[in-house]
Image (cartoon, rainbow, N blue to C red):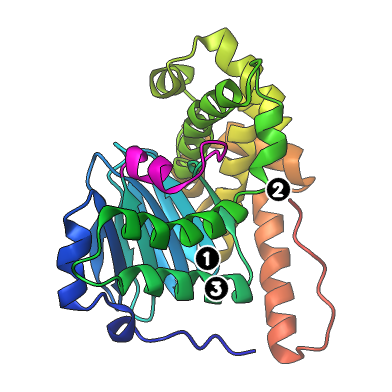
Amino acid sequence: MPDTFVTAHDARIPAPYRAGIAAMPLRLATVARSERARAPAPMFSFWLQLRGTAQVTAAEGSFVLRAGQWIALERGSMPEVQSDERGLTIALMLTPDVMHGALDSTDRGLLAGRGEVPLHERRVALRLWRQCASLPNDAGAAAVMRGLKPLLKHWQGAQDHFADMIERCPGRSFHRKTRIFSRIQKARLYLEGNPQRMLRIEDLMELTRFSSWWLSKTFHAVYQETLQKASMRLRMQRARDLLLNSQLSITELAEACGFHDPCSFARQFKAWHGETASTWRSRQQLAVAALARDPDVPVAASAC
């Protein structure tokens, strides 16, 4: 089915309705056609990419949103979202008290993180988002909360894969586990948003307010991999992206992935992929060329 979302102009909040929403610490926004938007510091924000791509720059790092992907960021992150020429992003920004006021006391609320949803879920999200945007100007707080709840519940569903990770967090109560998960997610997002940097445990300790020992232990329990392995996996992923999509030399590429010594990068790349970076790049280029000549020719999957 083609991706036929409404245009950015159609998705905007009509002016008479913006005033009513603005009376509360709640904002609905679209970012489209090379536009830029920023979330206020006190607000939690959830961004869903409907089509095209967008660049997200936040306190946790830099991220690219492609169609179907979402990112949720804690208050204080102050993300700035820049759309490409055909991109369309919808966003919900709200304070934690508004979020929890709209949900049942047993709900975990929305949590920081990243994920992806299929096309039909994007369509549902857009419909619910537009229902919130069309609340009448004189709607009271109770009506706004009722209108907001279906959208929050729908986006909670996009975060169902967090459930097992929350359960692996230390703590006796679900509330305690969720609080720890929210903090450890900051470390994960920082790693994902800064694959060009070497891991500095001090940076993650400052973000999470965990000790080095507690942070390392909890991260491994929640995500089933060590901090060091997660960092290296993300840096190797960045290396593959640059090998495919840039003309950087191996030395330049090593520096772009946080390696000050090209020999160290070469050793790590070969250990992860079983071949040198130059060989990997040549093989992928040959595969892409073969696919361009004959789309029916099977191409071996890239090593991860």
Residue 76 falls inside the magenta stretch: no
Q: Is residue 101 above or below residue 261?
A: below
Between the C-alphas of marks 2 and 3, the distance is 45 Å
Q: Position of residue 294 (x, y in %)?
A: 77, 91
**Residue 245 numbered mark, or none:** 1
Q: Label for residue 276?
A: 2
Q: Which residues are magenta?
A: 95-108
Answer with the quarter of the image where residue 240 lies.
Answer: bottom right
Foreground: 262 or 179?
Answer: 179
**In x, y percent, where is residue 2?**
59, 90
Nearer mark to the viewer, of 3 and 1: 3
For marks 2 and 3, give the one nearer the viewer: 3
Using the rendered view, name the quadrant where residue 209 is placed: top left
Name the residue at 38% across, 81% down.
86
**276 lies above or below 151:** above
Residue 23, by quadrant, is bottom left
- Amino acid type at image mark 1: Asn
Crowd tier of the residue under label 2, counting other residues whose Cα lies within 10 Å: few below 14, some 14–19, many 20 or above: some
